[in-house]
Amino acid sequence: MNTKQIDYCIELAHTLNFSKAAENMFVSQPTFSYQIKLLEEEVGFAIFERSGKGATLTPAGAQFVSYLTGMREDLKRAIEQGQNFSAKYKDSISITLMVRQAVYFLPEAMRIFAQTHPDIQIVPKFKYENSMEAFLSNDTDIVFALKEQTKKIPGINTWELFESKIYLISQKDDSLAQKNLLSEEDLYDRTLMVGGGSPSALKAVQNRLIATGKINYFNSADHDTTLTNVAAGKGVCLAPGFLNDHSGQFAWIPFDCQENFSCVLCTHKNDNRDCLKDFIELLQSLYNEAIAIPF
């Protein structure tokens, strides 16, 4: 199967007419039909039913073309990225993080880094779950992680980035939003959203609050669902500061507790590129200089 046959197949599935599809692909109908026949012989099943009126997709063909269309789009994007890279860049550094705001200074770091390393491309990759597994499979050069996740993992370097505190998220017109620091007592008789893959430090705080018997709780599947519930007035939630998108949609109020999160970047121990070290040190310097932005 080649890209020409893939394009022909997708076009025929769209037009369901051999003559029209061949015309759209700028080839003769015999050539077009022959390539479709070769493709069907290769995959081992009929993709199209022929008739005097044109062509129709078989059930197997409809499913095949659906996957084929997605594969062709992925291939197109891969080619475009390759063309961009080959035209401008000599190397690339990929960094995986759960959400864009997790590394708040990433866009600024990319801008500054481009001034000193114009031939190095920084490629952000967003993966809310299993980011560490992807990193360990060498799918990325850098991964944002909590320090607790990196213990006893061989073959990696760990770079300290920042300490993130726990905040309570509420609607901006909530009375809690008027306070500068919240305590356990402030949440009595409130409904607290919990669950959703919370880190261990956050779970410890949630469990401690629930154990008082004075706080209602509601299980929420993930962070986005939790924020939707908060916006709908169903309750409030606790979250690490590194998830704050600073959009101003919600109030983020510091919560008085000892627990926090040590946020780090991990790289592969065998990746000794100077540009990689330069980029991480740039991120570290931006966080070290930050004073007013809460994390």
Image (spheres, helix red, strand yellow):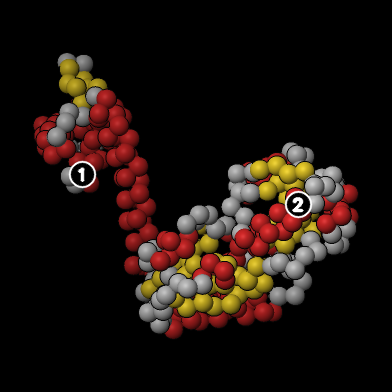
First in residue order: circle 2 vs circle 1: 1
> Can I make out residue 115 in this image?
no
Q: Within 10 Å of the Cα at label 2, are there few (<14), some (14-19), or many (20+) other Cα atoms?
A: few
Residue type at tag 1? Lys
- Residue at the spot 57% in from the left edge and 69% down from the top edge: 148
Secondary structure under tag 2 reads helix
The quarter of the picture where the C terminus appears is: bottom right
| Percent of width and height locating residue 5 | 19, 41
The quarter of the picture where the N terminus appears is: top left
In this view, 208 is above or below 109? above
Foreground: 131 or 122?
131
| Percent of width and height locating residue 56 | 24, 22
Foreground: 154 or 242?
154
Mark nearer the viewer, 2 or 1 = 2
- Residue at the spot 83% in from the left edge and 51% down from the top edge: 187
- Residue at the spot 40% in from the left edge and 66% down from the top edge: 136
Foreground: 72 or 257?
257
| Percent of width and height locating residue 65 | 29, 34
Q: Residue 183 — which label? A: none
Q: Residue 4 — which label? A: 1
The residue wearing badge 2 is: 211
In this view, 198 is above or below 216? below
Q: Within 10 Å of the Cα at label 1, are there few (<14), some (14-19), or many (20+) other Cα atoms?
A: few
Image quadrant where residue 271 sits: bottom left
* CA distance for labels 2 and 1: 64 Å
> Can I make out residue 208 in this image?
yes
Image quadrant where residue 160 sits: bottom right
Secondary structure under tag 1 reads helix
Residue type at tag 2? Ala
- Residue at the spot 60% in from the left edge and 44% down from the top edge: 221
